[in-house]
Amino acid sequence: MTLQEFFAKQPRGTKARIARECEISKTWLSLILSGRKPAGACLAINLEAATKGAVTKAEIRPDIWGKE
């Protein structure tokens, strides 16, 4: 599942909660979601944890880990 698919299924406020949990701004998260900025390796790991594994680090950064 991609981050975009994950957030499409979530209730309002989830992006803000995930951004807080990952200690990034909502703007930075939006840039990642739009594909304008890549998530760093550590952020990809944090996003995987914040989504409880629904979105894997390999899905976020296949260039680093490859799709599983």
Image (cartoon, helix red, strand yellow):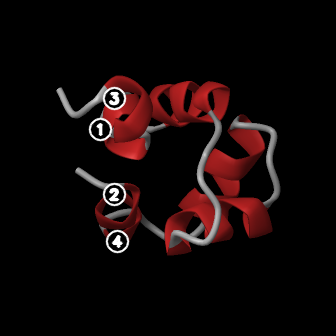
**Type of amino acid at the residue the image marks with label 2:** Phe
Q: Are marks 1 and 2 in contact (CB under 8 Å)?
A: yes
Q: Decide which of tag 1 and tag 2 comes sooner along the chain.
A: 2
**Type of amino acid at the residue the image marks with label 3:** Gly
The quadrant where residue 20 appears: top right
Percent coordinates x, y for residue 1 in the rendering: 23, 50
Q: Label 1's element?
A: loop
* Alpha carbon distance from label 1 to label 2: 7 Å
Mark 3 closeness class: few <14, some 14–19, many ≥20 residues within 10 Å: few
What residue is rendered at 53% in x and 25% in y?
45
Please tell me which residue lies in front, 55 or 52. Answer: 55
Percent coordinates x, y for residue 64 in the rendering: 43, 29
| Position above or below: 61 against 66 | below
Percent coordinates x, y for residue 18 in the rendering: 62, 47
Q: Are marks 3 and 1 in contact (CB under 8 Å)?
A: yes
Please tell me which residue lies in front, 52 or 55. Answer: 55
Q: Are marks 4 and 2 in contact (CB under 8 Å)?
A: yes
Q: Is residue 40 left or right of residue 65?
A: right
Q: Decide which of tag 4 and tag 3 comes sooner along the chain.
A: 4
What residue is rendered at 41% in x and 44% in y?
60
Residue at image mark 1: 54
**Type of amino acid at the residue the image marks with label 1:** Ala
Residue at image mark 3: 53
Residue at image mark 2: 6
Residue at image mark 4: 8
**Type of amino acid at the residue the image marks with label 4:** Ala
* Alpha carbon distance from label 3 to label 2: 11 Å
* Alpha carbon distance from label 1 to label 4: 13 Å
* Alpha carbon distance from label 3 to label 1: 4 Å
Mark 4 closeness class: few <14, some 14–19, many ≥20 residues within 10 Å: few
Please tell me which residue lies in front, 46 or 42. Answer: 42
